Image (cartoon, rainbow, N blue to C red):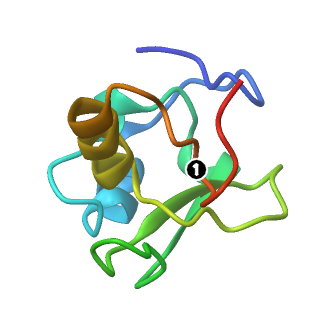
Amino acid sequence: MKPCQNCQTVIDEYPLDKQLEPLRDLTADDFNVCADCMTIVADACVKCGGAVYVPRSDSLTPDYCPACRADLIDLTGHDPGWMRGHAST
């Protein structure tokens, strides 16, 4: 079991997987944070209308869900970042 990159507690995959259900096929293995250090915002992705993953330390809600961000990287060859109009560095 991996520690959370934010608070360093061991990640309990069961509650995290339950929170990640709206994010298509993603599971706890795709994240390095525990359920206490993240939240899911339903219907927030501007591309698919699905849920987005938001670290609790972040005050902004991303425009793209992880799956749509990955799709855009595959389609365009560059990373659009989590927010429209702001490229990742």
Q: Is residue 1 above or below residue 54?
A: above
Q: Which residue is at 15% across, 50% downward?
A: 25
| Quadrant where the image shows the C terminus | top right
x and y, in percent, of residue 20 in the image: 34, 58
Q: Is residue 13 above or below residue 23?
A: above
Q: Which residue is at 22% across, 38% downward?
A: 75
Q: Which residue is mark 1?
A: 82
9 left or right, relative to 64: right
Q: Is residue 88 above or below residue 59?
A: above
41 left or right, relative to 28: right
x and y, in percent, of residue 58 in the image: 80, 53
x and y, in percent, of residue 84 in the image: 60, 61
Q: Which residue is at 28% across, 69% downward?
A: 22
7 left or right, relative to 54: right
Q: Is residue 72 visible?
A: yes
Q: Nearer the viewer, residue 68 or 86?
A: 86
Q: Which residue is the extreme one toward the front?
A: 76
Q: Nearer the viewer, residue 31 or 50?
A: 50
Q: Is residue 14 visible?
A: no
7 left or right, relative to 39: right
Quadrant hosting residue 77: top left
